[in-house]
Amino acid sequence: MNAVPQWRLAGDWFDICSCDIPCPCEFAQRPTGNHCQGVLAWHVREGQYGDVKLDGLTLVALGEFEGNLWAGEASAVMGMYLDERANERQREALQMIFGGQAGGWPAGFAANVGEMRGMEFVPITFEVAGDLATWRVDIPGLVVGHAEALSGPTTPPGKRVQTINSPGSEVGPGQVATWGRSVEVSAKGFGFDWTGTARSSKHIPFDWTGPN
């Protein structure tokens, strides 16, 4: 895979972070307390890297940073767990895309990572309810991230709290962010050890292409 082929990934992304609800970073502002740590999860519903199919694979990142990431003030520290079901070619493709070497939106996002502490292959369970009422990710002994859609007395039944054209979207422009709150979160590995409840969470679909 020396030459980067045409590729596309489409699927679901969500995070759970240490910020108050709603996370200021999504609005391109400094995080709560000027420091953010959290869990980020991507599930590929449809994916192709050249002739390598990537459907159904999941990745989870643990990270933290200080300052406004979108104003160039911050440099994130991150470690990443990749789906152990991926074969050798799929693993190489995912590392190329999420490492930023394959271009597209992930390359721009990867430029904000100052330290990548490593990648490990582990079993990952990822679920998003069809009505976006809940989303969750689990890695045995390492990561628990469960969230529910944000609601309140003026939210119509069955409706979701959503944002369009977010100025600080981790998945890039043009998608809809559905806001939630964590009900359980713990993250261990790569030097991170974080737990919390009732923190900010958001689900955003993604649809990326590259290398252009």
Image (cartoon, rainbow, N blue to C red):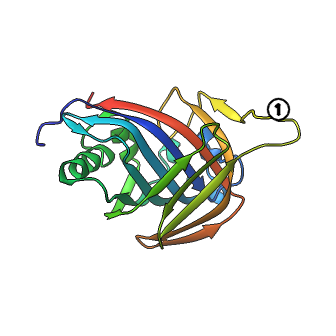
Task: From the image, tell me which residue sits under label 1.
Answer: 156
Q: Residue at x 81, y 34 (%)?
A: 157
Spot occupied by residue 79 in the image (x, y as percentages of width and height): 39, 62
**Residue pictured at 57% horizontal, 58% vertical:** 36
Q: Amino acid at mark 1?
A: Pro
Q: Residue furthest right?
A: 153
| Rendering quarter of residue 152 | top right
Q: Can residue 107 be seen in the rendering of this structure?
A: yes
Which residue is rendered at x = 32% and y = 64% of the image? 120
User: Residue 122 versus residue 101: which sits nearer the camera?
Assistant: 122
Percent across and percent down for residue 165 are 59, 27
User: Looking at this rendering, what residue extends furthest in the left direction?
Assistant: 2
The count of marks equals: 1
In the rendered image, which quarter is residue 109 located in? top left
Report the side of 185 relative to 121 (left or right): right
**Quarter of the figure that contains the N terminus:** top left
Q: In the image, what residue occupies the spot 18% across and 48% down?
A: 89
What is the secondary structure assignment of the residue under circle 1? loop
Left or right of 205 on screen, residue 54: left
Residue 118 seen in this snapshot: no
* Dot 1 crowding, Cα within 10 Å, few <14, some 14–19, many 20+: few
Q: Is residue 7 left or right of residue 58?
A: left
**The C terminus sits in image quarter:** top left
Q: Residue 108 appears at what percent x and percent y?
A: 37, 39
Say whether residue 117 is left or right of residue 74: left
Question: Where is 3 relative to 16, above or below?
Answer: above
Residue 48 screen position, x and y as percent: 27, 35
* Residue closest to the eye, 164 or 81: 81
